[in-house]
Amino acid sequence: MSNNTKEKINNSYPSTWSVVSREFKKDKIALTSLIILVSLISFVILFNIYIRVTDLHASYQDVDILNRFLLPGEDGYLLGTESGGKSVFGLLMMGTMNSLIVSLCVTTITICVGTLVGLVISYYGGIVDNIAMRFIDFLVVLPYLMIIIVFVSVKKDYGIVSFIFMLSAFAWMGPTRLVRSKALSESRRDYVLASKTMGTKDLTIMLKGILPNIGSIIIVEATLLFVANMGLEVALSFLGFGLPVGTASIGTLLSYAKDADILVNKMYIWGPAALVILILALSINYIGQALRRALDARQRL
């Protein structure tokens, strides 16, 4: 087949970007969610950069009993202050940033590990697949939330990095099972068999042959897993077993609602945090659904 013929065939199909952009133009909810998500994350990032450059980061962590429970707008506090006199707005911005970083790191680690393990066990199959899946099935049934809580309770001086790896250690099995199920059928297609016959390296076949054909599934799984990991971090921080003490988190702000007086009479402390996590979860969910439809359409083409 000549190069001109190949170019004509490639040009006859729309690019992945054009398919995705067309889907977002049709789905107004997904497009609005994308705009809101990008705007919110950009504002959070810029705010955290600003307070670190101007050395205001420490001031948002200072305890000031004289200014405790100030109402929104009082004495220059946009969202008021909590029981320690700290700015609720500052804690919300820093907490959102920390939650996003933890979720992004955990999602990246688990998707990379899960994809690699899933490709390997589905490609080689047989005894490799049987042994690996029995081990994964054993890990899946473990009460990982209880294990994390016990670890946090025993090891008091853990940091954010340790917390990220702790969450990642129990989150890679889901992507592995998904990738394995999708890659099993791909591993038996003619192009894989032809590549093996030609002497192509196994790793090359997996990464350049099988992986692009299941990439849409992995992208959608990553978006949904991002929300799940954020929810897990927020839930653990809400219970007091999340990020290290003194580290701002959305879950920490939500935990103020465990006090009946704050829950009913001081909603400005925990309400904005609940609203932010709701907006993030819904936006990413709608974006993930649009990506799934777009990438499925591209795969059919």
Image (spheres, rainbow, N blue to C red):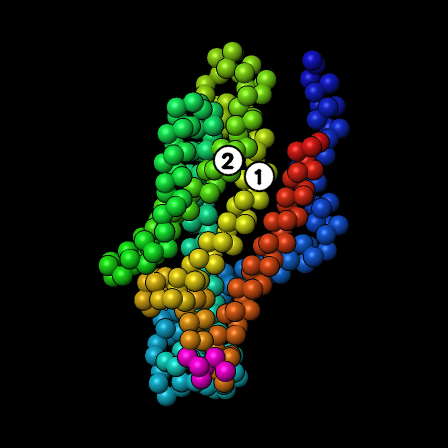
Report whether 138 appears left or right of 219.
left
- How far across and how far down the image is residue 234, in percent? 44, 62
Q: Quadrant of residue 285?
A: bottom right
**Residue at which label 2 appears:** 179
Give the magenta range. Answer: 259-264
Note whether 17 is above or below 41 in the view shown.
Answer: above
Mark positioned earlier in the residue sequence (2 or 1):
2
Q: Residues within 10 Å of mark 1 (few under 14, many from 20)?
A: some
Q: For mark 1, what is the residue?
A: 217
User: Who is closer to the viewer here, 62 or 219?
Assistant: 219
Q: Report, in whole angstroms, how far the alpha carbon at label 2 lies from the one at label 1.
A: 8 Å
Residue 161 in view here: no
Q: 132 left or right of 115?
A: left
Residue 171 or 65: which is nearer the viewer?
171
Question: Which residue is found at the position 52% from the left and 64% from the top?
Answer: 277
x 74%, y 23%: residue: 8
What percent of the width, then of the height, locates residue 107?
Answer: 46, 48
Place residue 9 in its image quadrant.
top right
Q: Circle 1 sits in a helix, a strand or a loop, which is it?
A: helix
Amino acid marked by disc 2: Val
**Taking 25 as reference, is 239 above or below it?**
below
The residue positioned 56% from the left and 36% from the top of the image is: 215
Specify whether residue 230 is in view: yes
**Labels 2 & 1 near each other (Cβ < 8 A):** yes
Q: Amino acid at mark 1?
A: Ile
Q: Which mark is residue 149?
A: none
Q: Nearer the viewer, residue 60 or 96?
A: 96
Prevailing SS of the magenta stretch: helix
Question: In the picture, which quadrant includes the N terminus?
Answer: top right
- Residue at (39, 81) in percent of width and height: 83
Q: Is residue 51 magenta?
A: no
